[in-house]
Image (spheres, grey):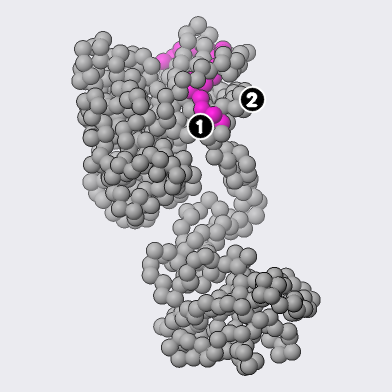
Amino acid sequence: MSAPARVLALWCPDWPVVAGAAEAGLPPARPAAVLASHRVVACSATARAQGIRRGLRRREAQARCPDLAVLARDPERDARCFEPVAAAVEELAPGVEVVRPGLVALSARGPARYFGGEEVVAERLVDRVAARTRVECQVGVADGLFAAGLAARRSLLVPAGESPAFLAPLPVTELELEPGVEPDTAGADDDASATRAELIGLLRRLGLTTLGAFAGLSATDVASRFDAAAVRAHRLARGLDERPPSRRRIPDELTVELPLDPPVDRVDAAAFAARSLAERLHEALGRAGLACTRLGVQARTTEGDELARVWRCAEPLTPHGTADRVRWQLEGWLSRRQGGSRDGGLTVLRLVPEEVVDAGRLQLGLWGEVGVADERAGRALVRVQGLLGPEEVLTGVSGGGRGPGERIRLVPWGDERTPRGADPEAPWPGVLPAPSPARVPPEPLPARVLDAGGAPVRRAARGRLTAPPAHVALGTDPSAPTAPVRAWGGPWPDPGRWWDPRAAPGGSLRIQVVCSTDADEIAAGRDPEPDPAADLAPDPVASGADAVGRALLLVHRDDRWAVEGIYD
């Protein structure tokens, strides 16, 4: 297994805040934070000194620091302001790759040999960026991009071959800094961010709290027990590249080019050209069964200058992601030229897939595409909210509660996907074990539960039943047919809101029952009997008659039984 190449990473701390404060003209000493969905996603050092942390709600952050400058999240601004930094690095060392705004990477071998060592290169880059852009930065060198990025956050030069030892004692939460993803500005609905958080939580529950402990697992065991994201994270924890080196030769016909006539000198026109060219690139990649992970953006100006920049991505790019990066890069180039009072514009735009992987590695999105349809659906829902109002488009969020109907909260689309008032992590005495019912009626359906002698089953003392359930009938009509109970589980008593005088006295009690079907009768060696559910009610949707013959969740409250959930 080949060792990863030496990588030099240059990192600008708190870049979203630095870029936002620069455009807003804020003094460097003023505390500032970037917010998304009313939560802090990045903050300055002066804000952290006053107790501001990522994840804080806006009100709490402003309560801790009344002088806090609140900045909106703007990826285009971050990329536009970062272009001068990337250009300053490129003045000393070629082959600069933008991992994300705030972090660039390049091969350390060439510059180290030219300038006489990695330490000399690091000092020169820090001085050059400060002189050209007045931005503070830190440099790290290690084997592989992941280790180099973590070394840059600590201003370390990790000796060759010692990246696994450098990574081993670090907490497993460092996997949030996976290359190509900006953790400081990741939104709450970002799939990659959610997947990483879920993996980190799982590893911590398993007792794997450090990267070294995770790296100590067998690669075969990780691949057989986890998903592809965990396999990539395991490679990073071992000090390897996130993907094995690609030796695939990229066909020339995958490069797409667009002549711009007349020349483009406005950002809106450049964005339109970027989107059409991104679609052409992905059509070509799709025909070849490939996906792009490193994108080269090239352009020619009216003066004949050739501009080029490479963007590195953790996940294969989608057409929307490609268009975003091209637009950000063009906006950076155009703003630099306008700031330098250079007339003219761009005459040619070219996209080059610098590195590709098999398209089979892509994870399909909710509507069958790679995240593009998800974003399109989200934009459509926002438009519907504009027509009907924000409270008319709701999405379900898991929360705390005992019954299935209590554990799902509906929040407006686009709002923070957190339960309101009920903490899912809090203890809930009487909560049902998994799995949850597949269907939950809007209102519990009335039912009757009878024992073997036909007498009603009721709640007894100490959360017990007066008799084992033997028959179940839907509705309250005593003459309604019943279905035999073949198995049941519980009971699970729920003390309820004992402090609330409006709540049901004594709380409630839940049981699970499995009613018989023809298949059950045949399996038991008996002749099938007429299905008692066939004529339970004329309207099966309204009454839930189709529930008999299935597994049901029944709740006993106010001395009455009702169907609270149906297991499909």
**Percent position of residue 458, x then y:** 55, 89
| Residue 340 position in % (x across, y down) | 41, 15
Give the mark nearer the N terminus: 2 vs 1: 2
Main SS class of the magenta portion in the image: strand
From the top left corner, tell me how far across and down residue 281 is, in percent.
Answer: 59, 23
Tell me the quadrant of the picture where the N terminus can be found.
top left
Rendered view: 118 above or below 319: above
Q: What residue type is labelled 2?
A: Arg
Question: What residue is disc 1 on?
Answer: 316
Secondary structure beneath label 2 = helix
Q: Which of 332 and 506 is in front in this view?
A: 506
In this view, the residue in front, 422 or 166, is: 166
CB under 8 Å between discs 2 and 1: no
Question: Is residue 437 in sight in this rendering?
Answer: yes
Please check the rendered image and state whether residue 309 is part of the magenta-colored stretch, yes or no.
no
Q: Which residue lies furthest to the front in this view?
A: 525
Q: In this view, does 51 lie above or below 16?
A: below
At 66% across and 75% down in the image, what residue appears? 524
Report the amino acid beneath label 1. Answer: Pro
In the image, what residue occupies the spot 51% across and 72% down?
A: 403
Residue range (magenta): 340-359
Mark 1: which secondary structure?
A: loop
Residue displayed at 62% across by 90% down = 452
The circle on residue 287 is: 2
Q: Which of 179 and 28 is in front in this view?
A: 179
Q: Is residue 350 part of the magenta span, yes or no?
A: yes
